[in-house]
Amino acid sequence: MPLTEPYDDHPPEEGSSAAAPEAGVDPGAGAPEPEPVLPEPVRQRIVALTAAVLPGLPADEVPVPLRRVAKFAPNRRARLGAPVIAAQLTADPLFRQRVTARVLADAGDLGAAVVEGTAPAAADPVEVAALAYLARPQGWRELIDASGAAVRAEADSAVVAELVREAEQRATRAEHDRAVARVEAEKLRDELARVREELGQLREEARQLNRTLRETQARERKANDLLTTERGRAARAAADADAELRRARARLAEAEAAAGVARASAKEARSVDDARLWLLLETIGQAAVGLRRELALDPVDKLPADFVADAFAENPAAPAGGPAARARDTDDPARLDQLLALPRAHLVVDGYNVTKRGFGEMSLEQQRKRLITGLGGIAAQTGDEVTVVFDGAERMHGLPPTPRGVRVLFSRKGETADELIRRLVRAEPAGRPVVVVSSDREVADGVRRHGAYPLGADSLLRRLSRS
């Protein structure tokens, strides 16, 4: 086979060495001889030798198609640039001569021997053929043919050696299989003897089982006779039990009649007690109406918390109620629903303490909007008074419309939301349930001293998530 297929991506440049006739060939003698058919190892060695010396050539001596290949890494140059290198060696004798000069210089004595047309007996035939193809001395085609014959002989020897090795392996496996077969035969003979012995034991066990079966069948007949006798006795006992059950049902009917009479008597007594309680409540209600008329109390338009921002601005520390009548030392989230179920309860919320704990990733405006909207739902469900307090010297812009039953307060300049919450608690009358939602320990301790129920922010957040 030729060294490579024709390579015609780029036409030869004007003055290029590719247009020059090969050295040693008479231009007028006719067409040059065709390229010899190279064994594959020889072709690969020629490409490897050319790729190794390619970066050492001056840039102007490297053909244009190989200039990019010369920049490849050494381990990629022979592998990726093999087609282009082979094409240039075939088509460009001048380039081949330049490569040959460097390759022969690196080959040393072997290169000198090949140039003289001889091949040392101990030399690698592939290396000799590659150098002969590049140098092309007198009789180079014979050297390549001899190398091809040697390569083929080595390949044939390798094939014969492989066949011999495979035959030896098959013989070894056959011997191993025969040994395994002998071992298995011995095992099978032992197993057969063991099976025969077990068969004898099973036959003896079968005889014993037959004898046991006959004895069991005899005992079964006796048991059936006893069972028939016991069934007669059980039938008589069941008849006696039915009679006793009928008598018990009669006594139960008498007891139920007596219980009905007792329930009627109890219902009549309860009706009398209800009538007495109704009369008592009616009397208390009329007394309260009279007291309200005597004190001339009119309906109020404002609640105590509405006066905190103005009435307590000058004296924020003034007490307004009993100390600890409403305090409860608990932070159970379930307590929030219980406390909101108390009549006329007042829910006070530390706004930013709750929002930053529950939805801190939002902007302050979105936090206020979400909290106020949720508190509107609680106020609508429970009917309780709800006040939410935020820190801020001035009223914030962008607040959503305040839902019915919800009051929104901002602390004044120089005052914190914690102080405003304590003033709201002090403003409530003693006995009214006030619930303060804040995870701030100081706020919880302060409102507890004034009788409020402190709860953590998590209790309100869970209540809002249920709504």
Image: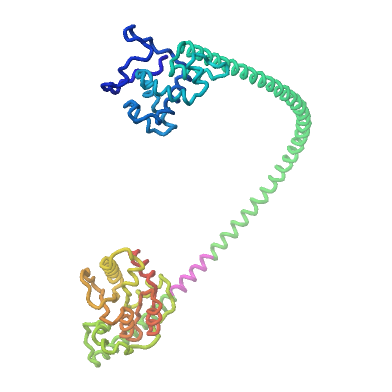
- Closer to the camera in the image, 102 or 69: 102
The residue depicted at 23 percent of the width and 85 percent of the height is: 310
Q: How many marks?
A: 0
- Quadrant of res 58: top left
**Percent x, y of residue 154:** 55, 16
Q: Quadrant of residue 64?
A: top left
Magenta residues, as a range? 252-264
Give the quadrant of the N terminus.
Answer: top left
Work out whether 345 lies above or below 87: below
Left or right, 175 with respect to 458, comes to right
Q: Position of residue 334 (x, y in %)?
A: 41, 70
Q: Residue at x 27, y 87 (%)?
A: 312
Q: Position of residue 43 (x, y in %)?
A: 45, 20
Does 311 appear above or below 119?
Answer: below
Which residue is situated farthest in the bottom direction here?
294
257 drawn magenta: yes
Q: Position of residue 197 (x, y in %)?
A: 78, 28
Q: Can residue 386 be seen in this snapshot?
A: no
Whether the magenta-drawn stretch holds residue 399 is answered as no
| Among the 4 quarters of the image, the one containing residue 445 | bottom left
